[in-house]
Image: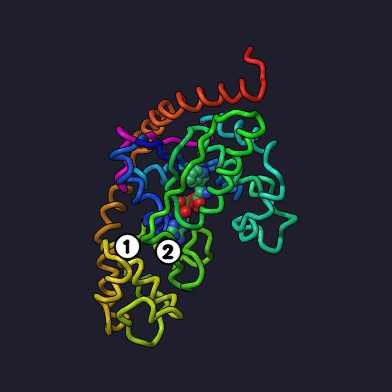
């Protein structure tokens, strides 16, 4: 049994990439492991959302976790900002992290774009805070989508740097858990870019809160190409949109990409799109309905978060105290 930690930013537009690449996998893990699922509001602050939206999206992520099957009895569901040790450990790690390591981070480069000088320090330090989230709980495994691989490698490097600096064997290196099915769901408008909360087009992604008509419309409008579907993925190497739709179908229907291709060999996109729409709705609509119910009762959501915070806090305070001793802060 290991200790699992992962998180989602409350930045709105939660989509099926977040579900397939992350949340869905967490549900299975909670059966046999100790599980902690954070709502990383400190990370979301790097995008400076307005405060009312931050509150709304925080409860939305909590509702999405619960509606997807994260059981508050088994797992701690909690907000990052309420446990001050996240920010504290992040600072301690900042003092050990060479700028050169951060300069390599692809996500920063993508998010900062051409306006690097205007990007905020929080965005630059984002992966250090993420390392603190993971190591504060001494998590052994971190289930995430493929886009987070580099951040997890950095978390391992930071753990090593801490141990070396203080000549201790305090942090074990956390293992990324990237499930091969739907590790990287692509945009419905462009099969070469990742499905993302920040894409300007709503048609690029399917949201947790999309109703069946909206899902059907978005899939109908999804980009395709003129050729019929081939029976094997290798024959569609230059057809990223086709591969993405088949991959999403497979992920929702519990089929490998190879089996999904075989199933639709020779079919037109319109028949694939019909099956895909039905498949997505059959999984996502019960989740949406449960989310809508939960969101009608914010106090209930807050009570679950408070319980999660209490559970997480025990571990966080124990570990941050030990870290204080290691680095030489007086315990007064
Ligand atoms: P966020 O909110 O951007 O993404 C949440 C999770 O969804 C996965 N994901 C995807 N998976 C497959 N296909 C996609 N198109 C796709 N888009 C997003 C992400 O990989 C992620 O697992 N930095 C984290 C948040 C975080 C965190 C942590 C995670 C902060 N601290 C500690 C683990 C442990 C993130 O990307 O959030």
Magenta highlight range: 67-82
Q: Nearer the viewer, residue 265 or 108?
A: 265
Answer yes or no: disc 2 within 8 Å of ligand 1: yes
Q: Residue at 26% of width from left, 76% of height from top?
A: 262
Horizontal relation, residue 197 to residue 270: left or right: right
Q: Residue at 30% of width from left, 75% of height from top?
A: 261
Badge 1 vs badge 2, beta-carbon distance below 8 Å: yes
With respect to residue 308, does 154 lie above or below?
below
With respect to residue 84, does 116 lie above or below?
below
Q: Nearer the viewer, residue 109 or 142?
A: 142
Q: Residue at 42% of width from left, 46% of height from top?
A: 61
Horizontal relation, residue 208 to residue 133: left or right: left
Residue 261 in view (yes/no): yes
Q: Quadrant of the N terminus?
A: top left
Q: State the count of labels.
A: 2
Work out how far the residue at label 1 is from the one at label 2, CA to CA, in angstroms: 10 Å
């Amino acid at each position: 049994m290991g200790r699992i930690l992962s998180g989602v930013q409350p930045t709105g537009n939660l989509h099926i990439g977040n579900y397939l690449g992350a949340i869905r996998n967490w549900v299975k893990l909670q059966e046999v492991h100790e599980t902690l699922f954070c709502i990383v509001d400190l990370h979301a602050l790097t995008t400076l959302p307005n405060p009312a939206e931050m509150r709304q999206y925080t409860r939305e992520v909590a509702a999405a976790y619960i509606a997807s099957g994260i059981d508050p009895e088994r797992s701690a569901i909690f907000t990052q900002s309420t446990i001050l040790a996240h920010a504290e450990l992040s600072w301690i790690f900042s003092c050990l992290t060479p700028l050169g390591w951060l300069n390599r981070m692809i996500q920063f480069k993508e998010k900062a774009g051409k306006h690097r000088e205007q990007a905020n320090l929080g965005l630059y330090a984002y992966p250090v805070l993420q390392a603190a989230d993971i190591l504060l709980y001494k998590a052994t495994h971190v289930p995430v989508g493929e886009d987070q691989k580099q951040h997890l490698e950095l978390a391992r490097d930071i753990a090593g740097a801490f141990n070396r600096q203080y000549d201790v064997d305090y942090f074990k290196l956390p293992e990324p858990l990237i499930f091969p099915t739907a590790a990287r769901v692509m945009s419905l408008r462009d099969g070469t870019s990742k499905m993302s909360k920040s894409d300007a087009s709503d048609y690029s992604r399917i949201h947790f809160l999309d109703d069946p008509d909206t899902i059907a419309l978005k899939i109908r409008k999804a980009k395709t190409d003129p050729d019929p579907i081939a029976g094997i993925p290798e024959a569609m190497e230059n057809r990223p949109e086709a591969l993405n739709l088949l991959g999403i179908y497979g992920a929702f229907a519990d089929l490998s990409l190879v089996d999904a291709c075989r199933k639709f060999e020779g079919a037109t996109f319109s028949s694939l799109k019909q099956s895909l729409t039905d498949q997505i709705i059959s999984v996502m609509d019960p989740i949406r309905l449960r989310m809508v119910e939960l969101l009608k009762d914010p106090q209930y959501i807050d009570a679950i978060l408070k319980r999660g915070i209490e559970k997480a806090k025990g571990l966080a305070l124990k570990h941050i105290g030990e870290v204080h001793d290691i680095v030489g802060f007086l315990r007064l």
